[in-house]
Image (tube, rainbow, N blue to C red):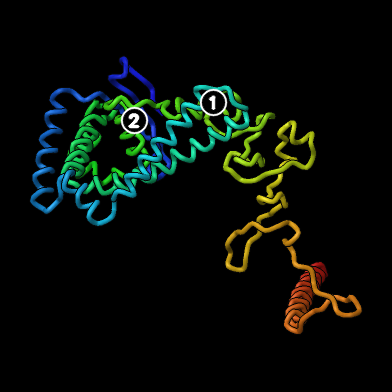
Amino acid sequence: MADKKDDNKERIVEGLDGDGNTIKTLLRQPTAQDYRDSQVKYNETFRKALDSGALLRQKLTDYMREQGIWDEEKQKENDKFVKDISEREDALKAGGIRLNDAKQIALELRELRADFRDLLAEKNALDQNSAEGQADNSRFSELIRMCMLDPNTKNPRFPDQKAYDTQADDPWVIEAAAELASMIYGLDPDYDQKLEENKFLKEFKFVDKDLRFINKEGHYVDLEGRLVNEDGRFIAYRTEKGKDNKDSEQLYFVNKDGDEVVAVTGEDGEEEWVKASLKERKPFLDEADNPIVLDDKKAETTTETKDVDAEEATASKASTTKKKRKTTKTA
């Protein structure tokens, strides 16, 4: 969560540490001196990377092609994604087609973008290892360190890069770094909202303001229209009235086929979800339709009965002794 201050030059963000405590951080835009200092870090890291054998980006591209990591086929796949995404965006912008067809195009666009991002991630992961990639990361880390301040003292939260690195993976630090990146590079926080497919899905109320799929009644649903809760679990209601009112007392969990499921604890102590009809196993029957009780089950039952009898006998004896003591004392 972020609160804007002073026309985007400063911003307060809140995040949680590993213990669930709220951490407030003041973010500020980098100054000209900050950029100069971060460039020094870039140069240092770039030189060290080259000395350690890191490849330049251009050489890395050649290396990926030689090794088949990013060859002509991958580039063709990349180009096809760009073409397919562009064509579907144009179709939604143009309109003039049936609403259901447009919805299908929007869903295809979502899937295409996700697959395209996965493809690019393969390439970008290797770019991080190039000399320029390592230097870029070092420069950005230095900017983050200098521009993440304690709101009370206005001093950097991390006195040096080593201190930052030890907490770089903490949730509150990750959130603050992402917010600072949007400030520095002008990233649009509403980027997803402005994608052509999401604008269409919101306009015709296939999704809510958070881009979660909903039905006409406003219930959360999956892509196939099945009811889900906020956590994405399949649900159903006992009655139509309960469904209309979103009555939590009428709600129950189901599997993807609509069968009611309940949580049970297995012999290993782990919780698992099973069909309600399978919660308790019924005994098998003999030819006379009488329940079959196995010998080991009989033994368990006999042992349990003896234990109960012993406990009752002990309790009875203790009660009798107590009465005798009371009688003796009265006499």
Residue type, label 1: Phe
The disc label shown at residue 255, or none: none
Residue type, label 2: Glu
Q: Which corner quadrant of the image does residue 9 belong to?
A: top left
Q: Which corner quadrant of the image does residue 328 belong to?
A: bottom right
Crowding at mark 2 (Cα within 10 Å: few <14, some 14-19, many 20+):
some
Pointers 2 and 1 in contact (C-beta within 8 Å): no
The disc label shown at residue 200, or none: 1
- At 35% from the left edge and 39% from the top edge, which residue is drawn? 79
For the residue pair 114 and 305, the one nearer the viewer reads as 114
201 on left or right of 141: right
- At 73% from the left edge and 62% from the top edge, which residue is drawn? 278
308 on left or right of 266: right
153 on left or right of 207: left
The correct choice, above or below, for 276 with respect to 210 in the image is below
- At 38% from the left edge and 36% from the top edge, which residue is drawn? 82
Label located before the other in sequence (2 or 1): 2
Crowding at mark 1 (Cα within 10 Å: few <14, some 14-19, many 20+):
some
189 on left or right of 248: left
Query: Can residue 152 be seen by looking at this rendering?
Result: no
Element under disc 1: helix
For the residue pair 264 and 99, the one nearer the viewer reads as 99
Whole-angstrom CA distance, mark 2 to mark 1, is 27 Å
Percent across and percent down for residue 104 are 57, 35
Percent across and percent down for residue 215 are 66, 32
Residue that badge 2 annotates: 179
Label 2 vs label 1, nearer the camera:
1
